[in-house]
Structure formats: C-alpha cells, structure tokens
Amino acid sequence: MISQDGIIDVAEFCPSPNFDERPNNAIIDLIVLHAISLPAGFYNTQLIKDLFLNCLDPGKDEFLESIKNLKVSSHFLITRKGALIQFVPTHKRAWHAGISNHKGKENCNDFSIGIELEGCDDEEFEKPQYQSLSRLINFLSIDLKINKQNIVGHADIAPGRKTDPGPLFDWTLLQSML
Ligand SMILES: [Zn+2]
C-alpha cells in the first residue's frame, strides 16, 4: 500500500536528495524498468544506495570514479534477493530516465515511476526479483491507476543511448505474473 506521502509500506525507505517536483498536471502513467550493477557486473546494493544518496566512495575503481558526481535516483530498487528499497516518493520526480521519449512525449521522468533491478545486460534476473517487481507493479496499478500495459525498458525510451534492463529481462514472465 502507498501512503499519503508516496511511500510503500513494504519497502525500506532510503530518502535520496535527487528529486524534484513533477510538472503541474503531470499524470503518472508509465513504469520504466532499469538495470544497474556497481561496479558493472558486480552486485553490491550498498554502492547503488550510496550513488543515489550522493555518498559514493569510488576507491580505486575508475568506473565508480566516473559516476560519483552524477545526481541520479530512481523511485525503487529491487535487489538480487528481491528486497524492495524506495528512494523517492511516488508523487515526486526521480531522476532516472535522462533524455527520453515515449510515444512522442519527452522527458519521461515527468510522468513515470523508475524501477531499478540489480542486474546487468549479460546475466538473467533472479526469480525473487520478478516476484518483488510484479508485486510492486500491482501496488502501483491499484494506488496510482497506472495501466499495467504501460511498462517499458529504459532502452525503449532512450534507444541508442541505453540498453537496460537488457536482452535477458524476461518480459513474458513478468506479464504472466501481473
Ligand atoms: Zn536505466
């Protein structure tokens, strides 16, 4: 269930400073799925949290160094074990999509919910992730009236620039669980 202040009660809430207001009259009607792993190809949820909370310590990792000053967030992250973490209230605008276009409408952050799955392009996602994701989508469809058909990947709204959630994300399985 989503509370008045846009927080889901089954999620661990880690408030990110990286959000702002949606435009006036914005209707949230899109769910954007992403994949992230930090460093790339490794699973370490703490580093993802640190990135979204602007406290990423890159150590000696060049890739982490290159992203440490990004101001990014998503509404939700689903860990490899299926745990749900929320960073931004649903009615606020999280910064996940970047330059994007869905059916002619630009800036998908304005009207979407961003969900990160811990993963990468060349590894299948875990069953508990699909379970947690389908449960979250069902909450969003009930509480925010988002049509369950309006789910896209980051690659769909930023083609050529993004590839996530990647070719191994099982869209058929997800649909069968909704
Ligand atoms: Zn993405």
Image (cartoon, rainbow, N blue to C red):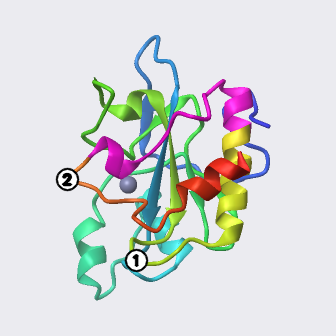
Give coordinates of residue 16: x percent, y percent.
51, 49
Asked if residue 89 lies left or right of residue 41, the reply is right
Which residue is located at x 65 percent, y 64 percent? 129
Based on the displayed image, in which of its 4 quarters is residue 104 positioned? top left
- Where residue 43 appears, as percent x and y from the top left, is 51, 80
Mark identifier at residue 160 = 2
Residue beneath disc 1:
122
Q: Quadrant of the N terminus?
A: top right
Q: Is residue 13 above or below residue 41?
A: above
Q: Which residues are magenta?
A: 139-158
Which residue is located at x 41 percent, y 75 percent? Answer: 38
**160 and 14: which one is in front?**
160
Q: Quadrant of residue 165?
A: bottom left
Question: On the rendering, which quadrant does ligand 1 occupy?
Answer: bottom left
Determine the residue positioned at 54% across, 61% down.
170
Q: Image height check: is 82 above or below 139?
A: below
Instruction: Please tell me which residue lies in front, 149 or 8.
Output: 149
Q: Quadrant of the C terminus?
A: top right
Amino acid marked by disc 2: Gly
